[in-house]
Image (cartoon, rainbow, N blue to C red):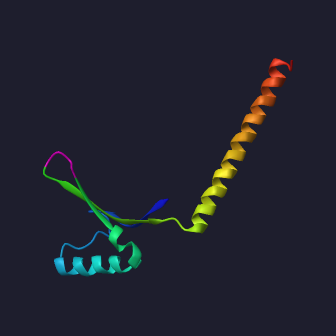
Amino acid sequence: MRKRIDIFKAEQCDYNFPTSNAVEFNKWLGNIIDTVPQENKDDLVIELESASDGYDSYDITIEIYYYREETEAELKEKLKRTIVNEEIELEKKRNLFEKLKRELGEK
């Protein structure tokens, strides 16, 4: 299964929003791209979103992420969590069953 890896997200008002200077922005973006493993660079996504307040103001959000295959360890951890959650749900059902038996009288 593919997993989304978030690298960067900021709104225009955030302290870490990139500069509007093109040369500095290019350097900043290059540094981010350099953090992505080579085998995932083709899956790197930059999402730019703008929202208007209805007047003349716009807020811009930048999101940078990529997708990669889950590691064996991540898959094992996910399976472990699933099993634990199923055991918890089963225990809740058993408890409810026993409670109902006591309330309704076992027949």
The rendered magenta stretch, by its main secondary structure, is classed as: loop
Q: Is residue 82 above or below residue 34?
A: above
Question: Does the image show residue 36?
Answer: no
> Quadrant of the rendered structure where residue 41 is?
bottom left
Q: Position of residue 94 (x, y in %)?
A: 77, 35
Residue in the image at 62% along x and 61% along y: 77
Q: Position of residue 64 (x, y in %)?
A: 34, 66
Q: Position of residue 5 (x, y in %)?
A: 43, 65
Magenta stretch encompasses residue 52: yes
Magenta stretch encompasses residue 37: no
Q: Nearer the viewer, residue 56 or 98?
A: 98
Residue in the image at 33% along x and 80% along y: 31
Q: Position of residue 49 (x, y in %)?
A: 25, 56
Residue in the image at 46% along x and 61% along y: 2
Segment colored magenta: 51-55
Question: Does the image show residue 79?
Answer: yes
Count the labels in the image. 0
Left or right relative to 88: residue 105: right
Left or right relative to 59: residue 31: right
Q: Is residue 28 above or below residue 63?
A: below
Residue in the image at 23% along x and 74% along y: 19
Query: Quick one: quadrant of the C terminus?
Result: top right
Q: Nearer the viewer, residue 25 or 52?
A: 25
